Amino acid sequence: MTVEQLSHIAGILLSLAIAYIPGIADWYAKKDTRSKAGIMALLLIVVSVGIFALACAHLVANIGLGVTCDKASAIQLVQILIAALIANQAAFLLLVKPYNR
């Protein structure tokens, strides 16, 4: 699994979790559009930084993500975040929005 695939999966799961997990979905639905965007962006940043932190803690070296704890991987963190954002929004548009009326 590549780091991009992991970020895609995380983005999709976050979108689905916030839309369909009872309690979380109700809490999130009450937020205005700007707050929802901020919350999702913050969660996706946490996922991206978490992947990098796992690499720095040497906890993902054996699963072949290709992320190391160096400057090049820190730059790759931005690519990870963009991939997660794209997957998250695609999942929302395809799997959440049509069913939230």
Image: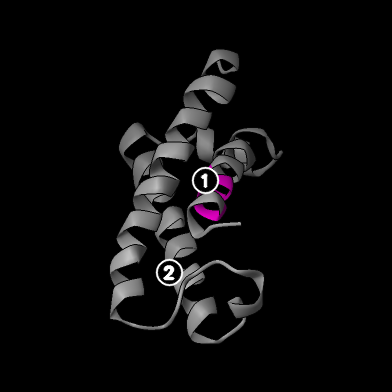
Identified at 51% across, 79% down, the residue is 55
Q: Secondary structure at mark 1?
A: helix
Vertical placement of 68 versus 51: above or below?
Answer: below
Place of residue 26 in the rendered image (x, y in percent of width and height, measured from the top left): 61, 36
Instruction: Identify residue for label 1.
Output: 8
Residue at (68% x, 42% y) in the render? 23
Q: CA distance from mark 1 to mark 2?
A: 14 Å
Q: Which residues are magenta?
A: 6-11
56 or 44: nearer the viewer: 56
Q: Residues within 10 Å of mark 1 (few under 14, many from 20)?
A: many
Where, quadrant-wise, is the C terminus in this rendering? top right
Q: Are marks 1 and 2 in contact (CB under 8 Å)?
A: no
Q: Quadrant of residue 79?
A: bottom left
Please tell me which residue is depicted at 40% across the width and 40% down the height of the picture: 36
Q: Nearer the viewer, residue 83 or 98?
A: 83
Q: Check disc 2 and give the amino acid type.
A: Val
Task: Name the mark nearer the viewer: 1 or 2.
Answer: 1
Residue 64: give x, y in percent of width and height: 60, 69
Mark 2 Cα within 10 Å, few/some/many (few <14, many 20+)?
Answer: some
In percent of width and height, residue 95 lies at: 59, 23
Q: Is residue 89 left or right of residue 5?
A: left
Task: Pick whichever, 2 or 35, lies toward us.
Answer: 2
Give the residue at the far right of this rendering.
22
